[in-house]
């Protein structure tokens, strides 16, 4: 994959998260791909689809701003700012997020997020 292909795939992943489209997100992964967030690891397209569907049932109004993408070979590091609203409480979650992404055969093989909800936003 070239750098532009990787950027496009990352943007598609962002768009799928924002749209809360579990099918679109899962299809970006290899059949045995894994998605890791703090405390959870989901492996395989079906498991990713199930977990993102569950997330979409609990959250709304997702906003993601990509701040930078660093690409080297078949890997990328993405820094983005993330927000969502918990449907049950109305609480707005906000976080800085860094994602390390590995690519294989035109898809995501591993997506690992490091989420920071504690550091205050810069003014």
Image (cartoon, grey):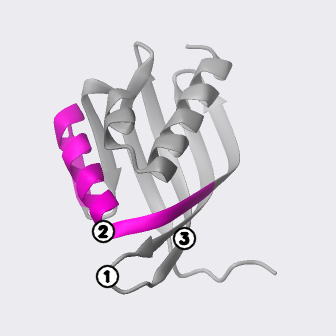
Sooner in the amino-acid sequence: mark 2 or mark 3 = 2
| Residue 45: in magenta span | yes
Is residue 61 found left or right of 44 in the rendered image?
right
Q: Is there a contact, CB below 8 Å, between mark 2 and mark 1?
A: yes
Residue drawn where x is 36% and y is 86% of the image: 89
Sooner in the amino-acid sequence: mark 1 or mark 3 = 1
Q: Which residue is mark 1?
A: 88
Q: Decide: few, some or many residues near mark 2? Use Cα within 10 Å; few <14, some 14-19, many ≥20.
A: some
Report the Cα–Cα distance between label 1 and label 3: 19 Å
The front one of 31 and 116 is: 31
Q: Quadrant of the N terminus?
A: top right
10 lies above or below 60: above
- Mark 2: secondary structure: helix
Q: Decide: few, some or many residues near mark 3? Use Cα within 10 Å; few <14, some 14-19, many ≥20.
A: some
Percent x, y of residue 18: 51, 52
Percent x, y of residue 54: 23, 58
Is residue 3 found left or right of 77 in the rendered image?
right
What range of the chain is rendered magenta? 40-64
Residue drawn where x is 62% and y is 14% of the image: 2
- Mark 1: secondary structure: loop
The front one of 38 and 94 is: 94
Q: Which residue is mark 3?
A: 95
Percent x, y of residue 64: 59, 56
Q: Which residue is mark 2?
A: 58
Asked if residue 24 can be seen in this view, the reply is yes
Name the image quarter holding residue 23: top left
């Amino acid at each position: 994959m070239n750098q532009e292909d990787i950027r496009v795939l990352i943007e598609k992943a962002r768009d799928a998260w924002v749209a809360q489209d579990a099918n679109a997100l899962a299809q970006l992964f290899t059949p045995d791909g894994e998605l890791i967030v703090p405390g959870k690891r989901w492996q395989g397209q079906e498991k990713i689809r199930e977990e993102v569907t569950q997330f979409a049932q609990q959250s709304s109004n997702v906003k993601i701003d990509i701040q930078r993408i660093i690409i080297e070979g078949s890997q990328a590091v993405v820094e983005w700012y993330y927000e969502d609203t918990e449907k049950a409480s109305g609480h707005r979650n906000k976080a800085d997020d860094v994602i390390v992404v590995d690519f294989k055969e035109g898809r995501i093989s591993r997506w690992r997020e490091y989420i920071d909800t504690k550091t205050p936003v810069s003014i």
